[in-house]
Image (cartoon, rainbow, N blue to C red):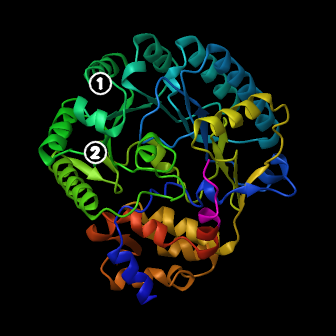
Amino acid sequence: MQDRLADLIQASPYQSYLYAYPHKTAYRPFAQPPALKDLWSAEDRSNLFLYVHVPFCEMRCGFCNLFTVSNAEDSAVERWLKALAREAAALDEALGARSFALGAVGGGTPTHLTAAQLERLFALMGKLAPGLRDLGVETSPGRTTADRLEVMQAQGVTRISIGIESFDQKTLRAMGRPARAEEAPRALDLIREASGARLNLDLIYGAEGQTEAGFLADLERALTWSPEEIYLYPLYVRPLTGLGKRRGLVAQREAPPDPAWDAQRLALYRLGRDRLKAAGYVQASMRRFERADEAGTAPRDDYACQEDGMVGIGPGARSYTRNLHYAQPYAVGRAAILDLLRSYEETQDFSKARHGVILGEEERIRRFVIKSLLNLEGLELARCAKLFGLAAREALPELAALEAAGLAQEQAGRLILTEAGLERSDAVGPWLVSAPTRARMEAYAWR
């Protein structure tokens, strides 16, 4: 364990963003695909999350490894909408009585859809998940228009997330983002004028040539709109992305170690964290910052991703039950995504889960621990013991090692990451991945 801990401390702080556990690269085809009705029948369906995946963008950014295609024809959007309706109908039958706490539309870029197409999408969601308490939609500066915002306002959208990344054209170019910097202020003004939704604004740090002064200028510009939330994302270079191809990155999971780049990203993270705290924001995770007067007030804060179920529809969406996660196969390259999108559009029977991973007891505990620990509120030790009948430190001896290294500490019955641990979240998360899951992820054939 001490050798492993030394590896963690000495390794790059930027291993991987573990936004889900296990990652989709650990998913495989099921030998006997289970029926969704059987999967969900024994689940608590009183506090679900509905995620809708829109696989289209007007452009593909150099850092993007999401399931999305750019410059899609209108006919492709129509085929996707029809397939989405078939999938929603199958879930309507499979789920039975249910209640959704949250809904989110992501992608891709949901506002790649026209206003009329967005109305059709929201109507479909309304049938599957009536009475959503919180509904979020992602947008981009170039696709934020008055007619789309009017539809969102009418449909009760409570959160709009916009990927600004940077207000500086040179920095956008270094990220491989083919956007015009002047679009961002216009889009943000329009959101504030036409919508009462909470605003989340995304920025990225770590682009080549990006300085502390430049990143601070981005932060100051962002603060002029007083967003309820700000996410600060470190830049990653991943296989088969535009930036990855520039570096010849194909087989490796992430870019090779680069101490100078690590130092740049860490310095910019600390600068951003400190500036946002000084501006009255509360840090909720390594990435997420909430305006102090809004912290903990959104309906989404009643949902616990490490416990409550998630229902995903769309070709890149994933779904979670307690013991099984499922989704379509994962891909990054355009040709593979187009093949998977075509397969999705042609699917008539959405009644079974065909590709995913079954979680044994150890993996369920690890998921609970990882997803709890990477948020600033931390791991509730008593809750973990109640759910699994096993103390967290007993189940995962790695936790005691994190404490001994000063990366985690117990406070009021919770194990939380220290400031040093929080800024290494993208190393701590991967470090806690089990050996079998890590082997499955490493065996994934990138495409």
Disc 1 or 2, which lies upstream in sequence?
Answer: 1
| 189 to the left or right of 146 | left
User: Does the stretch in magenta take in 441?
Assistant: yes
- Where 442 sits versus 134, above or below? below
User: Does the stretch in magenta take in 220?
Assistant: no
Which residue extends farthest right?
A: 32
Q: Secondary structure at mark 2?
A: loop
Residue 344 at x, y percent in the picture: 74, 33
* Residue closest to the eye, 66 or 208: 208
Residue 32 at x, y percent in the picture: 87, 56
Q: Is residue 409 at all visible to an observer of this figure?
A: no
Tell which tag, 1 or 2, sits nearer the viewer. 2
**First to last magenta residue range:** 440-447
Residue 275 at x, y percent in the picture: 16, 49
Q: Is residue 103 at all visible to an observer of this figure?
A: yes
Q: Residues within 10 Å of mark 2 (few under 14, many from 20)?
A: many
Quarter holding residue 13 = bottom left
